[in-house]
Image (cartoon, rainbow, N blue to C red):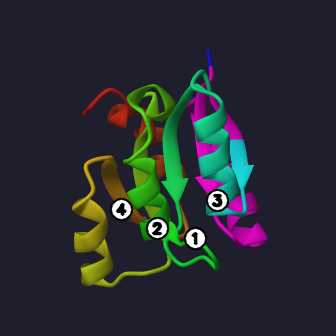
Amino acid sequence: MAHRVMLIDDNESDLLFTRLMLERCDQAYEVVEYESAQDALKYLQSDPAHGIAVILLDINMPGMNGFDFLEAYEKLAAANQAEAVVVMLTSSPDPRDRARAEAFGSVRGYVTKPIDKATASGLVALFGRH
């Protein structure tokens, strides 16, 4: 059974590269992509049975950025969160961004782009660690 991974990133190239790394690692992932954090949040709100296990979230996006998404995500009903964990997947190596991200209870990792196969494979270790 494939683990559902939601990618949220406004950059098409980053979405493509991350999806390829997820597809080429030794895990079975089903990837759901969003270029808009608002659209991703609407999806999570509309379907409590979404089955998302991990959300890979960019920080710097127009409109709703990654931190705005996290604030809204953590206010969702538990059924809509469905125990998904969030990994920040960002180009920002800024330790202040890392500290800010790690202050959110749903965040379980912080990865600087680009993701590699080993990191993609290791995402399964995060499931269920709340």
Q: Nearer the viewer, mark 4 or mark 2?
A: 2
Q: Which mark identifies residue 64? A: 1
> Marks 2/1: CA distance?
6 Å
Q: Hey, what amino acid is under mark 3?
A: Gln
Q: Residue furthest top?
A: 1
Q: Residues within 10 Å of mark 3 (few under 14, many from 20)?
A: some
Give me the residue at 32% from left, 26% from top. 128
Q: Which residue is mark 4?
A: 110
Q: Could you tell me residue 125's position as x and y percent?
A: 35, 33
Query: Who's the residue at 70% across and 54% down the image?
Result: 39
> What residue is pinned by disc 3?
38
> Is 55 or 73 nearer to us in this picture?
73
Q: Which residues are magenta?
A: 2-31
Quadrant location, the N terminus? top right
- Left or right: 11 in relation to 64: right
SS type, badge 1: loop
The image quadrant that residue 72 belongs to is bottom left
Residue occupying image coordinates x 72% and y 50%: 33
Tell me which label, 4 or 3, sits earlier in the chain.
3
> Are circles 1 and 3 on residues that touch, CB within 8 Å?
yes
Q: Which residue is mark 2?
A: 68
Q: Magenta stretch containing residue 52, yes or no?
A: no
